[in-house]
Amino acid sequence: MKFKPANKIQDLQYFGEFGGVNPSISDSSTYTFLSAKTMFDTFEGDAEGCYLYSRHSSPSNLYLGEALAAMEGTEAANVAASGMGAITPVLLQLCQGGDHVISSRTIYGGTYAFLKNFAPRLNISTSFVDITDLEKVEAAITENTKVLYCEAVSNPLLEVADLISLSKIAKKHGLKFVVDNTFSPLAISPATMGADVVIHSLTKFINGSSDTVGGVACGTQNFIDELRSVNDGASMLLGPTMDSLRAASILKNLRTLHIRIKQHSQNALYLAEKFEQDGLRTVYPGLRSHPGHEMYKSMMNEEYGYGGMLVVDAGSLDKANELMELMQKKNLGYLAVSLGFYKTLFSAPGTSTSSEIPEEEQKEMGLSDGIIRFSIGLDNDIERTYEMMRECMEEIGILEPAEENAE
């Protein structure tokens, strides 16, 4: 049967302690025990249903984790206070000094900076490769390689990873396959294609209201237990704990994710097709011109479309900045980083979310100065949005007026 992530979320039903339709929020940092033995057993991980300390787990965090695990089709999940608070413990749990990671070269700037600049302090090295070239991926594997890491749809260039083939390579060489699915929740389900761990920044589409940061790692029950171990669990010992109030808030927003993702995708596809027709260099997985279009299509849960992320090349950084400032002035969205908000967000990733990547490496991967990354909003009248965006592009000379084009 086809995996249906929204059904998995819907089928979870929680009751608050007084019969509320939302589970009660656990507003405690520590929890009491009726016997000393139960406290001891909980420290050892042997007391089901008991809570020890909120850095370890809390009812609110476990409710959210259970819903996200259901969404991704994994046994369990552990939530964290930020996306990086999920990513870094996973990598540190899977690697130790002397180990090697193979990572896509186009990933979120924070992840890149961690692997490139911080992990070497712990004697963990990384090879950054073109994740769409399977031969290069396999050629980069050494006897010390432990993890193959990529994003299902990459930030910011929207490259599409062949998750099934990458999973086969990982299993062939005994590697853990870790996939960041932040750009494509519901649309792509990496665990069904062999990913060992699926990561999200909950800050983005899953929460959807740009009012909090959060992260999650979804995997086997055994791996999540390892992350939470009081003795050597990276999530327990590094302390990236999500607050219970935030966990409860994100869980509520998760219930509308399926509706929002469909609208984000519908709007982004409309704009992408229009911009491409206008002659702009446009990158969007829903376009036939996208190198990963057929790959995405083969992996996607169809009703959710090709996602809300869109890249347009304005030609130069000056033009990109001028366009973004004008669009913000016209109330078309915000000149801001992040994604998944109800309003459109836009930024020049080379000087913002991917600025950690050296300039020469940006050029090598095709991240030119004029690129604008759009997180397309939930606009009800997307035709009106397009006309207004086009007027902004005409005003600053990125596009010629439509009348001249017609001539």
Image: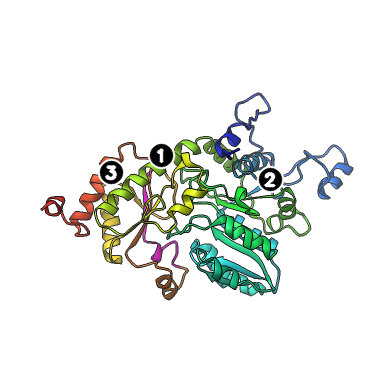
Q: Residue at x 16, y 51 (%)?
A: 402
> Residue 335 occupies which quadrant of the picture?
bottom left
**Label 3 packing within 10 angstroms: few (<14), some (14-19), many (20+):** some
**What separation in Å lies between label 3 and label 2 (alpha carbons)?**
40 Å
- Numbered badge on residue 263: 1
> Which amino acid is tagged 2?
Ala
> Which amino acid is tagged 1?
Gln
Q: Residue at x 73, y 47 (%)?
A: 53
Residue 80 appears in the figure: no
- Numbered badge on residue 385: 3
> Which amino acid is tagged 3?
Thr
**What separation in Å lies between label 1 and label 3 (alpha carbons)?**
14 Å
> Residue 176: x and y, percent?
67, 60
- Numbered badge on residue 76: 2
User: Magenta residues, as a range?
Assistant: 342-355
> Residue 322 occupies which quadrant of the picture?
bottom left
When the figure is inspected, residue 362 is found, relative to residue 279, above or below; the finding is: below
- Does 80 lie within the magenta span? no
User: Which secondary structure lies at badge 1?
Assistant: helix
Q: Is residue 1 left or right of residue 299?
A: right
User: Which secondary structure lies at badge 2?
Assistant: strand
When the figure is inspected, residue 171 is found, relative to residue 182, above or below; the finding is: below
- Numbered badge on residue 277: none
When the figure is inspected, residue 49 is found, relative to residue 164, above or below; the finding is: above
> Residue 206: x and y, percent?
52, 44
- Does 348 lie within the magenta span? yes
- Sequence-wise first label, 1 or 3: 1
Q: Residue furthest top?
A: 19
When the figure is inspected, residue 266 is found, relative to residue 178, above or below; the finding is: above
